[in-house]
């Protein structure tokens, strides 16, 4: 009995327990409504099913939430420009690869060039954010608000206000399938991003540096860390992630619509970090928590679609569930539950006596 | 004081266990009307727990608490209930609202109302009266944050007293005040005492106890050692009672120091006209290997700022610094660290600890920063280093993976010391390393300083306790008004001479 309680305590004390529990609940709800939810079938040589769809659709959010997690951890602020930066990156890629034409069906430049340029532009814009936050000490929300609004304008400048199409099958592969591989490509990209970042955090001192700066930047400086540089790096990295996400977003629709690509995704990215049990005030963080958070958000959306909720009403249902999840993880609720337990124990104790 | 010795608070046979630890065992405490009663003990003696039990923050298991005017023993389940029973606490960190006015702070939660609205006129008038009664003459319509911490604390006290507190608990109220402010606080305490308020005064400063208190209750390891009248308990005996051993330890350090050869090592660091505008005026200073050099002066005299200018915590904007005879430029602390320096800052909470990181991470972080991001210290080495310093410095922690914020102040300070010792510096700056730390740990740190110096390390020691400096330092630099005003060598070191130098010769003994 006591051993089981000990094991239960260990499991519940595990940092990712609550985020995982939330995800599990969201997924399990589906079994009631949609019995086929966990079914995976093979059609045309690729895997189909709700689960595959969730993994696929959540990829860009996962990638963005990785960058967002580091930004939050180091600076205690959020980067609200990631959606706009994704749009700029996408616009750059299509502009280079499509030669600036409104619609084309062949590459005007090597794919690698377009891809690298898109990511470099993302990193550059991230670096600009980093410069404003770390060096100029502007509040993160305000600093990134600049690109949040100006970013889409820059993308419009590049596309000259048009929606540019690039109807090349090869271009669609990043957001779709590579022939012969049954899983959607974005899933691999997301996993690669997670692995590289985890490696960077665990095999170098970067993870410890980021947490130290996020918890106490004065003390960090006195132990020899360059807080400015570390914060700057996280923003640049976040921009890089936005660039990669932007490539996936544009590849899915093989076009760039500067007004709508990655619209409002920054809010989901911030939410993913919070759902992952991370403190938005900075400091200690869990990258996998944010990843789980991002998947949870997509699972929720897919669930609601599976339940035939219309796209217009989706946000209301989403909001209700998010409130529940956030409340479940709040320290205040834990305290209240504990008090309740104590009170019940006291009551029953009295009755026994 | 004609009320005499009426008992207003009585705690009897109080016991309290934390998992695995007896925090309080059968402790008695008695407070009389119009007395200032010091509650003393080392860290972990049970002072805080006793206060928490009394104010309803923690529950006690056995025993009873009685207050005057209540027939039944009382049980406080929250600080609010304690307040209703006439027991109020003012903490070191004032918990008022800095952006509200003084009057609002005094009446928050119990504002005088008139026709459903707050009656500002009455509130301000009554605030003025309350404060005048306590000889505090300030504008009550101004936001609290415009006043010094000392005044804020007094306002917190005024609020507590006005809410009909008969028992006032002051928990380490003086640790961030300068001498002048402490004196003002003491005036206020004496004033309240004359009005019949019983004050429980928790502090680490022995001198203050002897200056203002009537009685002392000493706790050790959760047990009551005894209750004493201040006049009948000499300082040395008080320390002995707190530590449970004789004061010889401290005397021994002094002796060791005296026996030390005065011959100085070679010059390690030399500053010429180094300065940082606004904090420290140009100074010349030579620091030798194997010496403990003390910086002495009042709060704000520039003693911390001098150290910060050398370390690059505040980048020096003029002058020259030489390390081992070579001219160096220090742009940031990391440069100083690479030249073999270490710096334990004055403000442990804000500049020292990284609260949410573990003991292990807190110890290795400086070495890791020096090595650079890509040369991660292996997990195994990290653990070895941590265990070594937990052992060496006798850090009390359940595990090396415990967040440092869960440790007591003294143990946190030891972790930071460990952090720097791991770097094996040639020159270590210790700014108030023993502030807010119990006597036992204090002695340990002082011993360590002397020992490190004997092993060849140069140490800069800053403390506001002159006695402590006399015990550890072999040379002393005196500062006044952000300016280095003199150096005292071995034979000149004495409480009198230092006081005179600090005060600028204006003190007539």
Image: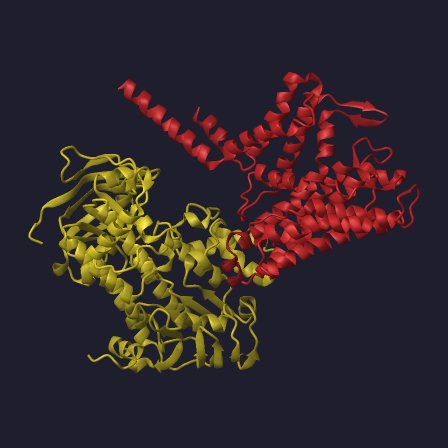
Chain colours: A red, B yellow
Q: Is residue B487 above or below residue B376?
A: below
Q: Position of residue B314 (x, y in %)?
A: 50, 69
Left or right position of A71 against A187: left
Q: Quadrant of the N terminus of chain A?
A: top left
Relative depth, front residue between A276 and B465:
A276
Which quadrant of the figure has residue B186?
bottom left
In the figure, is residue B124 to the left or right of A293? left
Residue drawn at x 62%, y 54% as measured from the top left: A143
Q: Nearer the viewer, residue B139 or B59?
A: B139
The answer to which quarter of the image holds residue B163 is top left
Q: Position of residue A292 (x, y in %)?
A: 63, 35
Figure disc tally: 0
Horizontal and vertical percent position of residue A296: 63, 32
| Quadrant that contains the C terminus of chain A | top left
Kindly identify the residue that appears in the image at 71 percent across and 27 percent down. A51
Residue drawn at (25%, 60%) of the image: B137
Viewer-side residue, A90 vs B101 = B101
Q: Let me know if residue A272 appears in the view.
A: yes
x 49%, y 30%: residue: A7
- Does residue B170 appear in this view? no
Q: Is residue B174 above or below residue B107?
A: below
Q: Position of residue B424 (x, y in %)?
A: 50, 66
């Amino acid at each position: 009995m006591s051993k089981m309680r000990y094991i239960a305590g260990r499991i519940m004390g595990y940092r990712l327990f609550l985020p995982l529990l939330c995800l599990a609940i969201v997924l399990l709800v589906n079994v009631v409504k949609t019995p086929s939810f966990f079914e995976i079938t093979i059609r045309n040589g690729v895997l189909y099913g709700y689960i595959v769809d969730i993994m696929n659709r959540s990829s860009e959010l996962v990638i963005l939430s990785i960058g967002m997690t580091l930004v939050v951890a180091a600076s205690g602020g959020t980067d609200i420009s990631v959606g706009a930066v994704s749009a700029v990156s996408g616009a750059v890629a299509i502009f280079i690869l499509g030669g600036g034409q409104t619609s084309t069906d062949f590459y005007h430049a090597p794919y690698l060039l377009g891809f690298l340029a898109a990511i470099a532009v993302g990193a550059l814009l991230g670096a600009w954010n980093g410069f404003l936050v770390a060096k100029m000490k502007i509040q993160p929300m305000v600093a990134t608000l600049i690109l949040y609004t100006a970013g889409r304008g820059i993308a419009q400048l590049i596309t000259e206000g048009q929606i540019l199409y690039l109807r090349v099958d090869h271009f669609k592969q990043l957001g779709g399938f590579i022939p012969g591989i049954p899983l959607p490509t974005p899933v691999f990209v997301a996993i690669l991003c997670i692995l590289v970042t985890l490696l960077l955090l665990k095999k170098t001192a970067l993870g410890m540096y980021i947490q130290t700066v996020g918890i106490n930047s004065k003390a960090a400086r006195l132990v020899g860390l360059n807080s400015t540089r570390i914060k700057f790096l996280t923003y640049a990295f976040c921009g890089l992630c936005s660039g990669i996400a932007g490539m996936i977003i544009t590849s899915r629709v093989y076009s760039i619509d500067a007004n709508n690509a990655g619209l409002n995704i920054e809010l989901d990215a911030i939410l993913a970090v919070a759902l992952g049990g991370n403190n938005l005030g900075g400091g200690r963080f869990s990258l996998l928590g944010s990843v789980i958070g991002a998947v949870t958000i997509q699972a929720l959306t897919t669930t609601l679609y599976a339940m035939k909720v219309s796209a217009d009403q989706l946000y209301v249902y989403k909001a209700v569930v998010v409130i529940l999840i956030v409340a479940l993880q709040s320290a205040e609720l834990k305290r209240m539950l504990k008090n309740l337990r104590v009170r019940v124990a006291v009551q029953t104790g009295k009755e026994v006596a | 004081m004609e009320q005499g010795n009426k008992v207003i608070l009585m705690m009897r046979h109080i016991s309290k266990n934390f998992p695995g630890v007896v925090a309080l065992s059968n402790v008695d405490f008695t407070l009389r009307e119009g007395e200032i009663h010091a509650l003393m003990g080392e860290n972990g003696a049970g002072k805080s727990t006793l206060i928490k039990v009394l104010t309803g923050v923690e529950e006690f298991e056995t025993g009873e608490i009685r207050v005057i005017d209540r027939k039944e023993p009382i049980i406080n389940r929250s600080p609010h209930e304690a307040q209703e029973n006439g027991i109020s606490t003012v903490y070191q960190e004032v918990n008022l609202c800095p952006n509200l006015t003084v009057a609002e702070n005094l009446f928050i939660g119990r504002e005088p109302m008139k026709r459903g609205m707050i009656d500002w006129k009455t509130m301000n008038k009554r605030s003025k009266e309350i404060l005048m009664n306590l000889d505090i003459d300030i504008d009550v319509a101004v936001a609290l944050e415009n006043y010094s911490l000392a005044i804020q604390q007094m306002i917190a006290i005024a609020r507590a007293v006005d809410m009909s507190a008969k028992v006032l608990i002051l928990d380490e109220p003086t640790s961030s005040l300068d001498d002048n402010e402490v004196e003002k606080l003491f005036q206020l305490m004496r004033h309240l005492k004359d009005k019949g308020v019983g004050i429980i005064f928790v502090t680490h400063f022995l001198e203050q106890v002897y200056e203002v208190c009537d009685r002392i209750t000493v706790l050790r390891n959760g047990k009551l050692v005894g209750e004493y009248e201040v006049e009948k308990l000499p300082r040395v005996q008080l320390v002995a009672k707190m530590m449970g051993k004789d004061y010889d330890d401290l005397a021994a350090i002094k002796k060791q120091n005296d026996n030390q050869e005065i011959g100085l090592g070679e010059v390690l660091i030399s500053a010429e006209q180094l300065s940082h505008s606004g904090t420290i005026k140009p100074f010349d200073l030579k620091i030798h290997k194997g010496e403990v050099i003390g910086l002495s002066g009042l709060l704000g005299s520039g003693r911390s700022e001098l150290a910060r200018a050398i370390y690059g915590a505040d980048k020096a904007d003029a002058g020259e610094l030489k390390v081992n005879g070579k001219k160096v430029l220090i742009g940031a602390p990391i440069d100083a660290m690479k030249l073999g320096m270490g710096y334990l800052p004055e403000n442990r909470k804000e500049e020292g600890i990284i609260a949410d990181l573990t003991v292990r991470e807190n110890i290795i972080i400086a070495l890791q920063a020096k090595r650079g991001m890509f040369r991660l210290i292996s997990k195994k080495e990290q653990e070895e280093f941590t265990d070594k310093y937990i052992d060496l410095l006798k850090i009390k922690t359940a595990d090396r993976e415990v967040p440092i914020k869960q440790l007591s102040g003294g143990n946190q300070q030891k972790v930071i010391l460990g952090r720097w010792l791991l770097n094996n510096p040639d020159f270590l700056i210790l700014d108030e390393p023993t502030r807010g730390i119990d006597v036992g740990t204090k002695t340990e740190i002082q011993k360590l300083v002397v020992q490190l110096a004997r092993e060849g390390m140069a140490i800069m020691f800053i403390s506001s306790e002159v006695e402590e400096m006399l015990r550890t330092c072999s040379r002393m630099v005196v500062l006044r008004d952000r300016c280095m005003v003199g150096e005292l060598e071995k034979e000149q070191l004495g409480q009198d001479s230092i006081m005179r130098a600090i005060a600028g010769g204006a003190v007539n003994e």
